[in-house]
Structure formats: structure tokens, C-alpha cells
Image (tube, rainbow, N blue to C red):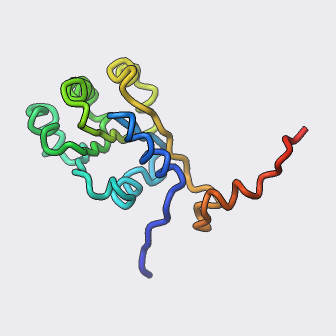
Amino acid sequence: MKWHYKPRWIADRIRKSLSFSSIIVLTGARQTGKSTLLLNEDPFKTWHYLNLDDLDTLSMAQRRHEELLALSDHLIIDEVQKNPTLLLYVKQTVDQDRRKRFILSGSANLLLMKSVSERLAGRALYFELLPFSYGEERERDLSEWIARLPEEKPP
């Protein structure tokens, strides 16, 4: 059986947000498809992707963060909760160069980490990826579902 990617409705909102936000934080429960979305959706699939689950990458993030953050102007850092200190350097990098774009991804508890909100205050937009909706599972377009909504508000 051949695997194929099912587009996520939230991807368009994330794409649009990149025009005015340098940092996007994508959270969600384990196995909701955060990494899959970032590795398969345009334009993210062309960005430089780093996963802090990889011990060599994590070590570089801890010891040589300047080199890591200089790899690309468009960088995805997955499992970022494994090195919260890196957020300070991401903030610094964005403050020095507004052309840089980062997507920081991690588990749902990432939003609960006080350090994340403090270190990225005013610089990041936060998105939570939920499990597949019925429409996404059926690969329906979001506008198709919106068109079905009643025009009047329910009582």
C-alpha cells in the first residue's frame, strides 16, 4: 500500500502568517502530524529541517547555536522543547535580521512552558495542530464545509 500525504486545513493559515510573523510555533499532541505537515506542505517542505530528537543536532543546538541558526533564512526546528535555551537565540536572530523565518515545532506541552511565552513574547504566532477532522480525513476542501454552514446563527 502506497502512503500519500493528506493536506491539513491549518497549513494555509500558517503560510499566510509568515508574511507578517518571523516565528511560528506549531504545537499539538504526539502523532497529530506536525512533522508530516512541515515536511510535505509548500513552502515548508523546501525549508531546512532540523530535529532535536537527533542527538548530533541537539548537541549542535546546545554548543554551536550560532552555526545552527545561520544554516538558512528559513528554518524548521522540530522537538524544540528539548532545548528551551535555543529560543533566546532564535529571538536574538530575528531581532537582528527580520528576513529570517522560523517554525518551531513540538509537543502540546510546549505552550505550557513558561519560558516559551516569555522568551518569544511579541515575536511568535502560535498554532495547535489537532488530530484529523472528518473533512481532512475525507480530503475535502475547507471552503466546501464552510459553504454548508447555515447562514443564520443557531438559537
Q: Is residue 96 left or right of residue 107?
A: left
Q: Quadrant of residue 138?
A: bottom right
Q: Position of residue 58 (x, y in %)?
A: 18, 40
Residue 150 in the figure: left or right of residue 25: right
Q: For this view, does 71 lie left or right of residue 74?
A: left
Against 38, residue 140 (above or below) is below
The residue drawn where x is 37% and y is 34% is: 21
Location of residue 146 with respect to 60 vertically, above or below:
below
User: Which residue is outermost to the bottom?
Assistant: 1
User: How many numbered marks does the figure carry?
Assistant: 0
Q: Nearer the viewer, residue 129 or 62?
A: 129
Tell me the quarter of the picture where residue 78 sits. Answer: top left
Residue drawn at point x = 45 percent, y = 29 percent: 111
Residue under the point 27% across and 42% down: 77
Rendered image quadrant of residue 52: top left
Split into 4 quadrants, where in the image is the N terminus? bottom left
The image position of residue 64, as x and y in percent, is: 8, 33
Residue 46: give x, y in percent of width and height.
27, 57
**Vertical position of residue 110 compared to residue 8: above or below:** above
43 and 116: which one is in front? Answer: 43
Q: Position of residue 8 (x, y in %)?
A: 51, 56
- Outermost right residue: 155
Q: Quadrant of the C terminus?
A: top right
Q: Residue at x 44, y 67 (%)?
A: 5
